[in-house]
Amino acid sequence: MKKMSLKTRFFPAPAFALALTALLLSHSTAFAAGLKNDSELGVVLTSGNSKTSSSDFKQSNSYGWDTHFFKLGGNFLRTTTDGTLKAKNWGSQLKWEEKISGNTSGYAGLGVESNPFAGFNQRHSSDLGLKYSIWNDEEATWSFEAGYRLTIENLVVGPRRHLRFLRTFTEISAPLNPNVSGKLSAEFLPGLAEFSDYRLNLEPSLSAMLAKYLSFKVGYRVRYTNQPLPGAAFKTDTAFTTALVAQLK
């Protein structure tokens, strides 16, 4: 019988997020009371006629106090088939929100991601805008964001590019029954220099509670680029994921 093994190299950002969570939790009970953490891990291995391995990891840490809100996240995906790399991408995001009045907040964010199969080695993004909470309680949330994004892309083929986008984003989360909840996020990025150079990101998901801090999640991520980068064969990248989620809040 052949022994299967999965070798995965994680980008440092998710590991940093996990370390930050441990540090914050150990700092003080009062500080940890405002902390939220979501850790997702999905792994798929097959053998026999087809040998594949796939790993998908997402980490999100947030902390809010008074009128301030801080969020740090990271993600990593890697897939191989018969030892050949078929997909690999990672990302890390940092976001700061400050409540202005009522349900309105201002936000600033920084992000870096990589997806050579989509045509870029690194993509650096800086965000600035406003967020409005349409609905926010213990069971359901719905928010809308609008702002500006500056993006710098280091391409696999071609020179570095500087791009400017308008950014709109909405996310809604609500329970479907006592043990199952749903979430939908959508982001639309029309280009300022050329509107036809727009991007669209969608992610619907369902989560079912298994235990107090553990749930099972099924999600479908869609990343659409109307003008694909050099080296990218398709306009749309999709990923269907299943994962175990450890949640602290």
Image (cartoon, helix red, strand yellow):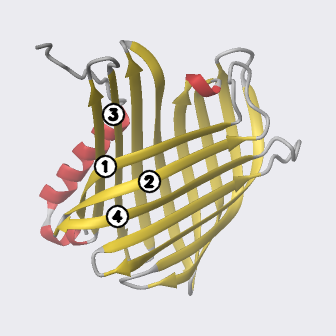
Check disc 2 and give the amino acid type: Gly
| Cα distance between the residues tagged 2 and 4 | 9 Å
| Cα distance between the residues tagged 4 and 3 | 19 Å
- Determine the residue positioned at 21% across, 72% down: 33
User: Is 98 on the left-hand or right-hand side of 225?
Assistant: left
Question: Disc 4 on helix, strand or loop?
Answer: strand
Dot 2 and dot 1 residues touching (CB under 8 Å): yes
Mark on residue 55? Answer: 3
- Determine the residue positioned at 52% across, 70% down: 98
Question: Disc 1 on helix, strand or loop?
Answer: strand
Mark on residue 243? Answer: 1
**Which numbered disc, 2 or 4, marks the residue that appears first in the sequence?**
4
Query: Residue 147: x and y, percent?
Result: 70, 60
**Which numbered disc, 3 or 1, marks the residue that appears first in the sequence?**
3
Q: Quadrant of residue 225?
A: top right
Mark on residue 219? Answer: 2
Q: Quadrant of residue 26?
A: bottom left
Q: Which residue is mark 4?
A: 207
**Which numbered disc, 2 or 1, marks the residue that appears first in the sequence?**
2
Dot 2 and dot 4 residues touching (CB under 8 Å): no
